Structure formats: C-alpha cells, structure tokens
C-alpha cells in the first residue's frame, strides 16, 4: 500500500493512495494550490490517477479539483449535499472571501461529478474505499476508509470531521454540533484503536490515541461543546 501526502495552501492535507508505486491511484482532497504537489507525487511514484475523492466541499479541500480532474480526464466523487460548494464557495463559508482570492481559484465543477452514498464501497485503482456519511462540519462530510490488510491497519481519511486532539468546527453554514457528535459516536467510536486517522489538517493520529486524549471523546461517547474548533 502506498499513501503519500503533503499540506497544500491553508494547511490542507492532500493525499494520493495506490496499491503500490507504478500503479493506478486516487487523489484525496486536492485543495488550493495543490496541483503542483499532486503532479510531483504522481511523477515520483509513477502513478496514474483514476479518480479524485472529496471528504467535503469546502474550498480549501476542493479548489484544485477542476485542474486535477481535467489534466487526467478523471471524475470527482463528492456527497450531493456539498456539491453546491463547487460553484458557490462563499455560500458554503457564510462570508465573502474577496475578489482577489476568488481570482486565484478555479470555481466550478469538473466535467464528471459522481455522488457518494453512505455505506457504499468504491472500487477504484484496485482499492476498496468504503464511504461513511459524517455530517456535522458540513452536511455532506464523509469518511473514506481502507480496510485492514496483512500487517497494515485500517486507515480513515477523516477530512475536517476529526483531527488529532480536536474535531471540526460547526459554526459555518451546514455545520451542526449535534450532528457532529452523532457522526463521531456512530462512525468513530466503534473503530478499532489501531485505525490510522489521516485528517484534513494537521498530523496523523489513531483512534486509540484520540479515544484516550481528545477532549471531545470519552470511552463511550463523544461530547462536543456548542462551538468546536
């Protein structure tokens, strides 16, 4: 298994995932100014992308989806409740980001947008990527999970729902503290402690570490304040 990543603009983690070097791959969350980093990883590991998958629709996670998909002729997968964010990023944030920044972004949809569904498994690039709907940070947030394999623990790409020591904020349009708590209880808490968490921002962690140290978790329940980080 090959998982490589880098922080794009605004500290957003972008990942490429493949069975091995020289194989097909998927790209996870190509955010603002991520195109060059994606192309570097593809060349370094001799990878051919077959899809882009998006944990949610905020522009810091999707701003490079049009050029990345366009350059390689691949679809983007996104939950339908966040699809409007591709063409109206300011509505998703609840404030204006300014004409200068908008001028630096590629606003719009790729030619092929496919919709994610809770509980399904995507069979892409020789990988089985399961999808869990985790609303709370946004209405269309999802986890992508790779199953445990020989000597490789389960891996969860958690977007902005779960970070090392924190959880996603809920004070932007579509955010909901109670929904986030329900998502964490339903999806995160049942996971094995060895599950590797690759979040949308910050360092990797594990479910076991978050269960033991994250102030928004306890052993049996996720308890969130009215506003989260």
Image (cartoon, rainbow, N blue to C red):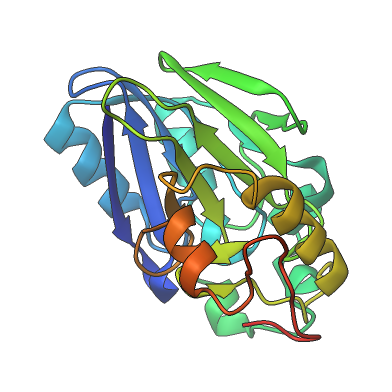
What percent of the width, then of the height, locates residue 96? 72, 84
**Mark count:** 0
The quarter of the picture where residue 33 lies is: bottom left
Q: Residue furthest front?
A: 219
The residue sitting at 35% across, 33% down in the picture is 17
The spot of residue 4 in percent (x, y) is 26, 44
Is residue 222 in sight in this rendering? yes
129 or 166, nearer to the observer: 166
Q: Quadrant of the N terminus?
A: top left
Residue lying at 36% horizontally and 26% vertically, measured from the top left: 25
Residue 176 visible? The answer is no
Residue 116 is situated, as x and y percent measured from the top left of the image, at: 72, 33
Image check: 19 left or right of 195?
left
Q: Up-down: is 104 above or below 117?
A: below
Image quadrant in which the C terminus is located = bottom right
Query: Which corner quadrant of the image does residue 79 belong to?
Result: top right
Relative to residue 125, is residue 105 drawn left or right? right
Picture coordinates of residue 88, whole percent (x, y):
76, 63
Q: Is residue 81 above or below residue 152?
A: below
Q: Residue at x 69, y 39 (%)?
A: 132
With 156 as the anchor, is 168 left or right in this view?
right
Quarter of the image for residue 43 reads top left
Q: Nearer the viewer, residue 152 or 6?
A: 152
Viewer-closest of 22 and 64? 22
């Amino acid at each position: 298994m090959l998982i490589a990543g880098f922080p794009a603009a605004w500290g957003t983690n972008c990942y490429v995932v493949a069975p091995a070097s020289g194989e097909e791959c998927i790209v996870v969350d190509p955010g603002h100014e991520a195109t060059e980093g994606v192309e570097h990883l593809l060349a370094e590991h001799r990878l051919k992308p077959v899809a882009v998958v998006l944990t949610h629709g905020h522009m810091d996670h999707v701003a490079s989806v049009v050029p990345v998909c366009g350059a390689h002729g691949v679809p983007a997968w996104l939950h339908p409740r966040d699809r409007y964010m591709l063409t109206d990023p300011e509505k998703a944030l609840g404030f204006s980001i300014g004409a200068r920044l908008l001028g630096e972004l590629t606003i719009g949809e790729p030619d092929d947008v496919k919709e994610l569904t809770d509980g399904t498994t995507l069979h892409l690039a020789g990988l089985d990527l399961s999808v869990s709907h985790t609303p709370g940070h946004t209405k269309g947030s999802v986890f992508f999970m790779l199953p445990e394999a020989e000597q490789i623990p389960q891996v969860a790409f958690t977007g902005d729902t779960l970070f090392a020591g924190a959880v996603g904020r809920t004070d932007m349009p579509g955010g909901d503290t109670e929904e986030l708590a329900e998502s964490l209880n339903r999806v995160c808490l049942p996971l094995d402690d060895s599950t590797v968490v690759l979040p949308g921002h910050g360092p990797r962690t594990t479910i076991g570490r978050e269960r033991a140290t994250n102030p928004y978790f306890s052993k049996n329940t996720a308890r969130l304040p009215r506003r989260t980080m």
